[in-house]
Amino acid sequence: MSVARPAAIAGAFAAGLATGALTRSKPLPSGDLEGGQDVGENEAPPVSEPPEPPQQDAPPADDPGKPDSPTDLTRSSVMFVLRNTANEFTRDQCTDLAAALTYYAVLSLFPALVVVMSLLGVIGQGARTADAILQIVDDISPGAAVDVLRDPIQQLVDSPSAGFTLVAGIIGALWSASGFVGAFGRAMNRIYEVDEGRPGWKLRLQQLVLTLVGLLVAAVVALVLAVSGPVAEAIGGYLGIGATGLTVWNIARWPVLLVVVVLGVAMLYYFSPNVRQPKFRWISVGAAIAIVTWVVASLGFGLYVANFGNYNKTFGTLAGVIVFLLWLWLTNLALLFGAEIDAELERGRQLQAGIKAEDTLQLPLRDTTVIEKNRDKEHKTRLRGRVLRRSRGRRA
């Protein structure tokens, strides 16, 4: 009895090993694709629905349960916003995003100048406006930066076909100039933790319209800013306002420039991301901080270049280009920092209202067409890859 039982146990154990070995030696091993079903050689894998985007069930952007303004946030919410803004600014790699935006800004800058100078060339105000633009740039940017723009602007003004350029190259120039708007929209999508869902044609059309509106406003403002010096004196004499009126106008043109900057930032913040904002704000907390940061950074960088930097000795004739690129990078960095503040303020409003936004901001999307297509493609690709892995490369 004692001898037979160990023998029986050993025989059963050997049979189990043999069965396992035969199972493992099958040419097409079955496997659990979705957690419970085996897939053979001619059996299709079970298909489950791809996951929905986290904003699928987001509440309305103007949900009445959220605080109306940042002043309604509690102290704990404000402290959370401040800490998370710094964390998200680093996590979203905003310094790298600002560098990418600087690249697109350079690519978009000169086509934009073509459009603006062509518009002004049609009404014969190109030369005077060019001088005003260069003076404004010289006042708000480091001294060497204006040298980068001086020659291209002068060439556009001196071109005899400046008026015809508007007709001949308006589409190409707008297309190129809209590159910055598109890049800024992608950066805003990362900040708001969403994917782009608008179809290509719709997205490009919105970018072109936004770029065109911005350039038209810039042309009008450039023309207004050009009304200084002898022109302003002539207009002042005609209106009978004298030297006092001229002084007032020379001071008032800076608020005009500030209004344009505020309008441009507001349009970028509101229209470029694929989220529906609670409402359009002429100036948000983030936009105000971005503009103040940009002004302070520009003044500080200008003082550094003028008094401490030795870019001319280091880079020689390229010093102006390097200074201009660094100034553009600081400008884009300030814009992204302001956008992060607005995004985190929205997260604080949602959390205080009891909305689950600690992982992902809950704002409704403008469009989900491309997101749904990409989601289906990725799901099918995963299924084909899983079949390929289970079959050891024999089918997909």
Image (tube, rainbow, N blue to C red):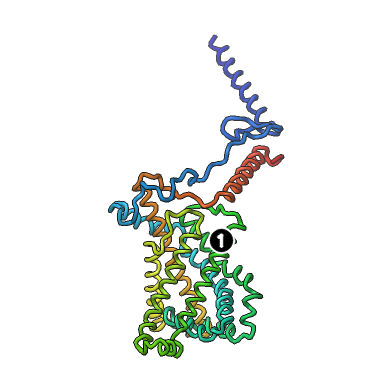
281 on left or right of 108: left
Up-down relation of residue 370 to residue 183 (above or below) = above
Q: Quadrant of the C terminus?
A: top right
Residue 96 in the image: above or below residue 364: below
SS class of the residue under badge 1? helix
Observer-nearest of 252 and 331: 252
What residue sits 34% from the left and 87% below the top? 244
From this viewpoint, which residue is outermost toward the left?
Answer: 75
Residue 303 at x, y = what percent? Answer: 38, 80
Residue 81 image point, x, y percent = 35, 55
* Left or right, 239 with reference to 216: left
Q: Residue furthest front?
A: 239
Task: Pick the quarter of the image with the N terminus.
Answer: top right
At horizontal 48% and vertical 53% (from top left) the residue drawn is 275
Q: Which residue: 62% across, 76% down?
A: 166
Q: Position of residue 114 (x, y in %)?
A: 58, 77
Q: Amino acid at mark 1?
A: Gln
Crowd rating for badge 1 (residues with CA inside 10 Å; few <14, some 14–19, many 20+): some
Which residue occupies the foreground of this view, 325 or 197?
197
Residue that badge 1 annotates: 206
Residue 349 lies left or right of residue 145; in this view the side is: left
Q: Closer to the camera, 287 or 193?
A: 287
Asked if residue 230 is positioned above or below residue 95 in the image, the reply reads: below
Q: Please provide percent x and percent y for residue 314.
A: 48, 82
Number of marks in the image? Answer: 1
Is 302 left or right of 18, judged from the image as shown?
Answer: left
Write the residue at 50% across / 76% down: 220
Image: 166 above or below 238: above
In the picture, residue 123 is in which quadrant?
bottom right
